[in-house]
Amino acid sequence: MEWSAGEVAELYRRRWDIESFFKILKQHLNIKSFVGTCEQAVRSQIWVAMIAYLLVKVLKRRASHRWSLGGLVHYLRISLLSTQNLFSWLNQPYDMAGTEEVLVLNST
């Protein structure tokens, strides 16, 4: 089987996209291994991770503060059990530091 240089380049690009996705899962979403071993369990965990990743990306895009992806994931983890307004916190995270409230999904 012979492939053109363009086909090889396209296959490599697709492979790189997959590698980049798993890097995000490992580094930012802290998924080091799969919980289940059957195909359905792995698929489910990948779907849940993709949903979580997309939710974080939506929050990052909506925030006026310039978050890094890893920074936002980190601060979401440590702030999930507070009652702060989520979108206020996203825009001014350091103005609310030290409060003992939980983030609430209230966009008003």
Image (tube, rainbow, N blue to C red):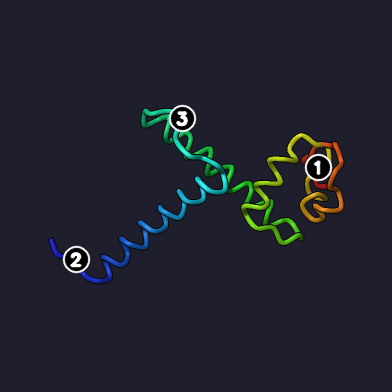
What SS does tag 3 mark?
loop
Residue 71 horizontal/vertical position (percent): 67, 52
What SS does tag 1 mark?
loop
Residue at 28% from the left image edge and 70% from the top image edge = 6
- N-terminal label among 3 and 1: 3
3D distance between C-alphas at marks 3 and 1: 33 Å
**Which mark, residue 3?**
2
In the rendered view, would you say 102 is above or below 24? above
Q: Is residue 40 left or right of residue 49?
A: left
Judge the density around disc 3: few (<14), some (14-19), many (≥20) Cα neighbours within 10 Å.
Answer: few
**Residue beneath disc 3:** 35
For the image shown, how many numbered marks are present on the structure?
A: 3
Q: Amino acid at mark 3?
A: Val
Q: Amino acid at mark 2?
A: Trp
Discs 3/1, front:
3
- N-terminal label among 3 and 2: 2
**Residue beneath disc 1:** 106
CB under 8 Å between callouts 1 and 2?
no
**Residue 20 found in image quarter:** bottom left
In the rendered view, would you say 13 is above or below 51? below
Residue at 58% from the left image edge and 48% from the top image edge = 54
Judge the density around disc 2: few (<14), some (14-19), many (≥20) Cα neighbours within 10 Å.
Answer: few
Residue 59 horizontal/vertical position (percent): 69, 51
3D distance between C-alphas at marks 1 and 2: 53 Å
Q: Amino acid at mark 1?
A: Asn
Residue at 76% from the left image edge and 60% from the top image edge = 64
49 or 30: which is nearer to us?
A: 30
- N-terminal label among 1 and 2: 2
What SS does tag 2 mark?
loop
Q: Is residue 102 left or right of residue 47?
A: right
Quarter of the figure that contains the N terminus: bottom left
Residue 14 horizontal/vertical position (percent): 36, 58
